[in-house]
Each structure stands twice: as structure tokens, then as C-alpha cells.
Image (spheres, coloured by chain):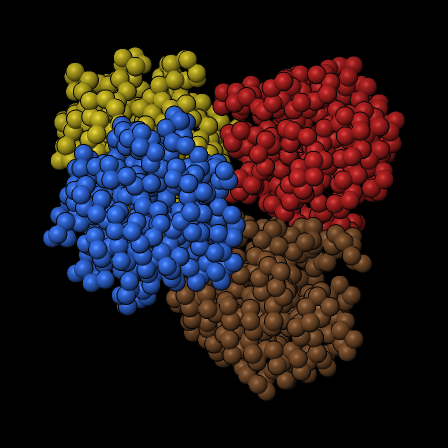
Chain colours: A yellow, B red, C blue, D brown
Amino acid sequence: MDRGIPPDKVIITVAQTGAITNKSLNPNVPEQPAEIADSAYDCYNEGAAICHIHARDASGENTSEIGIFRDIHGRIREKCNLILQDSTGGGPNLSQEERIRCLDAGPEMASLNMGTLMRVSGPYKGIPWSNMPQEIDYYVGEMAKRGIKPEMEVYSHAMLAEVRRLIADGLVGKPYYVNMVLGMRYQGAEPATPDTLASMVRQLPAEAIFNCTAVGSAQTSLGTMAMIMGGCVRVGLEDNIYYRKGELAESNAQLVARMARIARELGKEPATPDEARQYLGLKNI
Amino acid sequence: MDRGIPPDKVIITVAQTGAITNKSLNPNVPEQPAEIADSAYDCYNEGAAICHIHARDASGENTSEIGIFRDIHGRIREKCNLILQDSTGGGPNLSQEERIRCLDAGPEMASLNMGTLMRVSGPYKGIPWSNMPQEIDYYVGEMAKRGIKPEMEVYSHAMLAEVRRLIADGLVGKPYYVNMVLGMRYQGAEPATPDTLASMVRQLPAEAIFNCTAVGSAQTSLGTMAMIMGGCVRVGLEDNIYYRKGELAESNAQLVARMARIARELGKEPATPDEARQYLGLKNI
Amino acid sequence: MDRGIPPDKVIITVAQTGAITNKSLNPNVPEQPAEIADSAYDCYNEGAAICHIHARDASGENTSEIGIFRDIHGRIREKCNLILQDSTGGGPNLSQEERIRCLDAGPEMASLNMGTLMRVSGPYKGIPWSNMPQEIDYYVGEMAKRGIKPEMEVYSHAMLAEVRRLIADGLVGKPYYVNMVLGMRYQGAEPATPDTLASMVRQLPAEAIFNCTAVGSAQTSLGTMAMIMGGCVRVGLEDNIYYRKGELAESNAQLVARMARIARELGKEPATPDEARQYLGLKNI
Amino acid sequence: MDRGIPPDKVIITVAQTGAITNKSLNPNVPEQPAEIADSAYDCYNEGAAICHIHARDASGENTSEIGIFRDIHGRIREKCNLILQDSTGGGPNLSQEERIRCLDAGPEMASLNMGTLMRVSGPYKGIPWSNMPQEIDYYVGEMAKRGIKPEMEVYSHAMLAEVRRLIADGLVGKPYYVNMVLGMRYQGAEPATPDTLASMVRQLPAEAIFNCTAVGSAQTSLGTMAMIMGGCVRVGLEDNIYYRKGELAESNAQLVARMARIARELGKEPATPDEARQYLGLKNI
């Protein structure tokens, strides 16, 4: 099986919903299972291969309810073969125990934060958003049991230390999939700048495939730079609610479509879900 | 007068002809003054602000004939207000004395190589393509007398030493305009890779505006990365005869148009020639 | 007044005691005021200019007792003119309110952590060692009122964001004094490697003077590299209890003496306390 | 056989004579075979493992005379087992054909420049000091026939391209031994700064052992930084005639002794010649 991303391909992930954005910030954020599935299908048609999933309850609050994850999965699978990647970051109102429940909904991938950030404002100010080393080990162990590929999320150079530790301890398999999340307004996160991206890419372990998630207005530009550096890219309303300065995005698919157009201008074709499964060594292929 | 490039603008330079590409490699390379001017006008309409100019004689050979430079300038100026930037790199068949003659044709800018490269193949193999420090000083002096802005061309980290020397000696004025030419197949040139570009940008002097000229298939991708890093970009058949793998470019304008599309996807508008004059502090504005 | 460090000088800081090392790890750790002062005087004689101070109570536990800080200060001042720099990191058993009390003892400088680390083992496992942005602002404000120069301690690239914020908000004065602490075994801290040091130095703000504190066996080597890069260096039993592999250090002065010898081999003379006051712009000079 | 340098070892090379320094610049430069051998033995006693050799005729001019190289080799071998590394850079008065003759004297190693520099002053101004790719290939081929290990000398990021080419073409064997020569006052050479050293080390191929030769006053400091980064170091009067500012070095051994002292302060022991043979995979071991 081939590993790694061919130079003429790019894996586009869409993060549609998130834990913090909502309809009051942008009415086009999909929150309920049917909305999420309809929007996911549009993104699939525009070039997305992976769908990063957060679940909300009927009131729009973050939830770990396994039934809702299953509902979202089922509805998307009816429409297309997108890779389903559940968030274990969940949301600030969810406990560690709650955040891991989604694994039982049977995603092919799950995101996993490689450390701790401090919230500096809002109702959760001063409360760490944390995965301690033991928690990280527990989460990757649970994923391993279920054949779920972890997307290791790093918000800083420092968090790469946990990635190196997991590799050294043999707790994650090749190809290592690292998502660099830049620009979060938390203490401990690094800014979404070209210099930060280039510097972190230089420190990646060998045989890592990287993804770039730039939060806010740099979503398109840093994602493009990541593609040029041989990486993958995540877009979507979770990370950025605008299409351009002062103009709310109409949909997740609008953001996917733009990234797909840029990819093609650069000579790269968005990978299909099955191509992405092959590159990432997912079990289902 | 404002200096520097606003974050929502990019200066696109087109290098249409060059010294080595020709109609046998791509029949769409413009060589004669009327062709060059027509093509330049198309590029202007697609978003180019600066036209980098090499002259050819009637047989297609590189020439320093001042009359031909004047003819090209006149024909372009009839059509549009593109900034005219003559090459003092000329071509391998031209002597140092010949290469400087174009300054008398009255361009607003002129390119100037910051050192020496060794040709490793072809009829000029083993002959240095050289500007020694004294020659560089002479060239910038002649440009200064005529109010011509030098575009300092660097093919390597090492050539940045000449840029620093010119600045330290007060021989060039702000904003310093540095063109990074990456991917030339000469000994002494560095490859067109994201790492090289990022590393050289880090070593730029303060108050430098940079341009990126990636030779060959990386033209679009590294030029895009340069824009994302706050720089400018050069495209054109001089540096790259293909539109995509295996497909010759139809025209210079086709390459400019693609870069302008990418710029707009990234939230940047190509600067008009007069905007570029302002950003670069050119005399004519 | 001159700012910045002349290339033939280096400021050596000694961190003698710390919050975690103690006599059971190395019997030569000075804990009580008289010990601390005697050891400080030895370090002064070997080339230290700044003494970084933690206080312990009679049982050896970290304390914020102002009387003990005053006792330490008084005893050192009787012997020599070392710059006194109190730690506001204190120790894991001290609250935010307690950690700031030392400012009333009248040090010339005080250290201040630029963010949050997570302890991964021991009795304080899972408890953040934290300065949130508001706390940082409060601390620098209190220092400013008293004419105390902050040493901004950064354990990661991410913490440089707080340094940039303080500068942008005008909360700290030039020259900015940044201490890079590398190699702490906390989540959120970066390793003591040449690559991390070089990368963080590249991201320093202009007009920053930097100090390097490498924890553990890299203390001497990374401190030396920092001197070569134009920075300053901190040594001492707080950060490293060994003189070489398997051999406990005999004293803080032994570690200072080695760094002073290396500095002189490299053509640098340890700055006297008064020279350091001048370079750092301290009030007392 | 083990390859690579153990972290507690460093290979010190001494470059005693060079092509440009001479007794008029520093009377302690050894030029004649007996002087060179006596000085080499002193350096061996101080910790050098490799002796880099240039030969002079009776008048002190650079020579390619095989008899003189053999005389030097024989005299050194009588005294000690230093690794003999002849220079194929020779000197500006020697032709390509002359510069390779030393290989017949049977050194274990030979230096080889990975490209071209332009002399900017003196009698050879404007004349390239050049190894073109074909010449490099010829030289490494001749070395391979004789079992001589090339030391690939790079003066710039750009010259690393030739190293990569040789590796890709299988023309050199592991461990690749790369000498970074920084600070030469030739066009095409990069300055002896920490940033240049760190940047070039990052671009080294895997399985490369590197050596640092800093020309001029940075010899000690950049050599020390190289050791800290895991590399090796070259010192000697060829590259630096001063012991400290304004004070000529008394001997090559004085410079070796200082570097050995610094190495030991940093916990590294100078490798013996036989240890270095093992680390570099030389034939004679």
C-alpha cells in the first residue's frame, strides 16, 4: 500500500461546525444532523475527502451523545463516502470522559489534542482545555483498539513533543498524521503566520503527513502555503466564518470550493475519500 | 509617500522573453518589438504592473542594441502605463559593456544580478555569468544617475551579501527591491523549494520588498507562497514555458492571468502600475 | 545611556536554589539566607552579575515570607553589589497572591513567566503552573510602580506571544529582557536543543536582550551557544545539579566559574553587576 | 563498524598552513615539511585528529609537487598517527591538473570544494576559484579509486546542491563528511554567523557528519557552536592568524589546545585519530 501524498494531490478536510461557532455568528453553520449531512455532501461534491465532526444537541449545545454522532454518521454515509473524523476536543462544556464517547460511533479517524491550552476570555476563562500525557495515551489506546486513526492536533512547537513521545513509545502508527492548528486565541497557541508554519513543518518527524488548520482570516492563505509545502489543508466554518473581509461565508462548501480551485491552479487535484484512505493507511480500504 | 506593499495588494511582474527561451522551445515567446508590446498589453490587462524586458535582434539573438530597446519601450508606452524594467543580465553572448547600454533607453527600473553563477552546460559552459562587486557598484551608480530603480537579483543566500553591502555603503535607496530567483540550473544557484524561499526571506534586510521568480515548474507555487509571505511575484515565459505539466503555455498573459486569479482567491488585488510606482518609490510618480 | 550587550561582554545570572531542587538532590543547594548569601558572594567572585532568588522557610519549603526575602537581600548586599532578581514563579505550593509579595522586598529585577505549563508528575500533577494574561499584566504593573525590571521567562515559542503583547501594549520598557527556559519537563515546555534555541532567537522582538536557561545536562552547552548568538546565560543548581555526567556540582560557584572560563575562551568577559545595570537600563545606576 | 560521532566526542582538524597565509602575516605559520610535521605533532598532542595539508616550495609558494607532499606525510607519520588530509583546493596559482596530484601521495582524506567562488581582490581578482560539476565528479572518482575519503567543502547553501547531487548519483559513500567553510571574503561565500551555520546545518543530508571551519575572528565561537550542534571543528592558522583580537597566535597547537579545552568544558573529549578513523569509516582502520 502506498503511503504519503503524491505531489499532484491534496487532502481537503472540512470542519463544518466546531464547538464555538454557531448560527448567531454565521447562520450558515450546520448544527443538526440533517444540516450537517446535507452540507457535508455539498463539500464532498466540491472536493473534500474528510469531514471533521462536532455534534450539537437540539438546543445547539455541544454534546457527546452517541446517538447524535451515529445519526450524523449514518446520514453522511447515505449520501457519500467521505471519511468521518470525529472531534475528541468536543467543547468546553464536555468532560474528558464525555469527549471520548464518540469513538463508539465508529469513525475512521478522530482528532486528538496534543496538550493543553488556556482559555483567556469568556465563561471558561482560566480553565485549561487540556489533554495531559496520560489522557493522550488513553485516547490513542482506545483508538487503536477500534482501528481509528488519530489526527494529532498541535497548536504550538511545544505540542510536537507529545507527538515525538507517542512515536518513540510506539503508540501511533505510520504515516503519522499531524494537524497544525494555528491562530487560536488561547494562551499556549501560536499565531497563524507563514513563519510559524514553516518553522513547525521543519520540526515534524519523518514519515509525518501534515495538515494545516489556520483559524480566522489566514485560513485560505496558510492552507495554500501548506499545500505548497507538501501538506494538506482544512477549511470550514468551525475555524473561519468569513469568505472574505466583512463577508460571511455562505456555506462550508463555498470554502471547500475555493480551496479546490486554488489547488487546481497549483497543479493539485483534491484527493477522493478513497484516495485519502489509501494515503493515510485507513483500515476501511 | 507610502512605501511597502499593502497586505491586500501584490505587484505582478511579467518576464516575457528572457535570454534563453525562444520560439523553438515555445512558439509563443515574443521576441520582436511588436510581439513584445502586444503581449505586454495583454499582460497589463490581466494584472501585470511591471514588464521585465530582454531585447532580441531580427534573428532572435540577444542584443544590446539601444534602438531595439527604445522601440520596445515606445510600443508598450503607446498601449499602457506598465513599468518598464530592462534586464542588465542581457544574455550569455553579451559583454558587461553591452549589458548596461539599455539604461540609456530610459527604463524606470533595471534588473541587476548580485553576483556570479557558473554555466554547467551548453555553449557557454564553464564561463561565469558574473557581476563582480566593482561591476555591481558601477551599474547601480549608472542607474542612480538616471533615476532608475535597481531590482537586485539574488540566486542564493550568498548573494544577499552584496545586497547588504550596497545598503551599508548607501548605494541603493529604500525601499530595497530584491528579486529572489530560484531554480536556475547554474552552479551557485539555489533550488526552487519552499524551504529555500522561507530561509532567504528570513535573511532579508529590513525595509526590503521582495519578489519571487521561481524558474520552471515551481513558478506558480513558489510565487504563490511569496505572495502569502508578503512578497511580490514574477511569472512569464522567460522563466517557465509550460502552463502545466506537458502543456506549453499559450501566452505570457495566460500565466499572468493565473497568478492574478490566485491572488484574488487569497484576498489580494494585483497592483496597477501607478500603485506599484508608489509602493516602490519610482521617480515617475 | 548605552543599551544592549557589547560583543565582548556577557551577563551571567546564577540561579542558586530554585523551587524544586533541594539538599536531598544535591547537598550543596543553598536554602537558608546565610547559605544563599555566602554562595552568592562566591558566584560574584567567579563572574556572576545577577542573582536569581528563591526563598525557603526553615524547613526548606518554598516561601513568600517577605522577611526572608529581605534577609537574603540584606545579607547579599553586605557582601557585594550583585543585581538581585527575585522569582515570582515561587513554587508549586504558593498562590498567585503569595508569589508577588517578594516585590516588596525591593529587588532590582524580578522574573515573570509568560504563560502556563502543566505539571505531568509528582504531587502537583495536572495543576497548571500558570500566569494568565491578566495576571501577567498585573505583575508587570506592580513591577513598573516599583521600578523593578521584569525578566520575561518564556518556555516555548508560544509564550513569545505574551512578550509581543506586552510590548505592543507598552507595558514593558526597552531593552526587553527575555529569558528562554528550555528543557523543563512540563507539558507546554520545549526541549533544550540547539534547534529550539536558534528558532526562538529568530522570533525575538527587536531590541530584546535574551538570556538562556537550559535545564539539565544542556545547561553549559546551550548557555554557551546563547553567548555565541549574542545572548546572556544563566547557570546554577536550580536548573542543573550536576557538574558533569554522574558528578554532582560542588557549588553554584563551580558552575559560574566554568561558564566564565568558556566566556573568556570565546573572547567575552563576564559583565560586572554595574556594567549589567547599564546594559539593562536598571534604575539603580 | 560504528558510524557517526558519539555525543561525548569531537573530531578536531587542524589546518596549519593554507594557501594564502604565510610567515609575513604570522611568522608562526609552518611552511616547510619539517616545520609542518613538528607543528602537527604538537597539535596531535593537544587533541587534533586530522591534519589538513597544503604544501609550499622552498620559496614559500603553493606547490603541487608530489615529493613535497610525500615528505610532509612521511615526517608526520614518523611522529604520530594523525589522519592526513590533503587539500585539493591547492592555491590560486595552481591549475586543476596540479591540484589533484597530491592524491598520489596517499592521504587518507582529501578536501574538495563543492563549487565556485570569485576572488574580489588581489592578483587573482576576477578569476573564479572553481570546481565545476565535471571536475568534482572527476576528483571524487580519483579519490574513490585510491580509497581516499572526500571532505566536501561548502562555502554556501548553494554548494550543498553539489553534495546532494553526489549522494544522489552514488559518487560518495556514507557517512558523508561535509565541511562548512564560512567567512571567506570571496563572492559566493557566506558569512561566519550563527544564523548561517544553523541554517546550513538544517539543510544537511541525512547521515552527514559536519565540520565547521569559520574563517577569521569567528573561528573559535562558530567552531564551538558546531560542536554543540553535534558537529566537528577545524582550527588553525590557515583560517585565522590571531589568538585573540590584536594578538597573533603563537602556534597552531595554541589554537587546537583552546578548542580542546572548550570541548572538555562542554563534556566532549577530542577523538583520537583512530577513533576518528572509525567514526568516518576510513579505510586504514
Taking the view exactly as shown, the residue that stands out farthest to the front is C78
Residue A255, compared with residue A177, is above or below; it is above
**D60 above or below D177?**
below
Q: Quadrant of residue B21?
A: top right
The residue lying at 33 percent from left, 36 percent from top is C148
**In the shown orientation, is residue A20 left or right of residue B115?**
left
Viewer-nearest residue: B37 or C22? C22
Residue located farthest toward the left when viewing the structure as drawn: C59
Picture layout, residue D207 above or below residue C70: below
Residue A106 appears anywhere in the view: no
Residue sticking out furthest to the bottom: D78
In the image, taking residue C24 as reference, residue D207 lies left or right, namely right
**Residue shown at the point (49%, 62%) measured from the top left:** C265
In front here: D71 or B188? D71
Q: Position of residue B153 (x, y in %)?
A: 68, 38
Where does residue B198 sit, x and y in percent of width and height?
52, 39
Position of the C terminus of chain B by quadrant: top right
Q: Residue at x 27, y 29 (%)?
A: C138
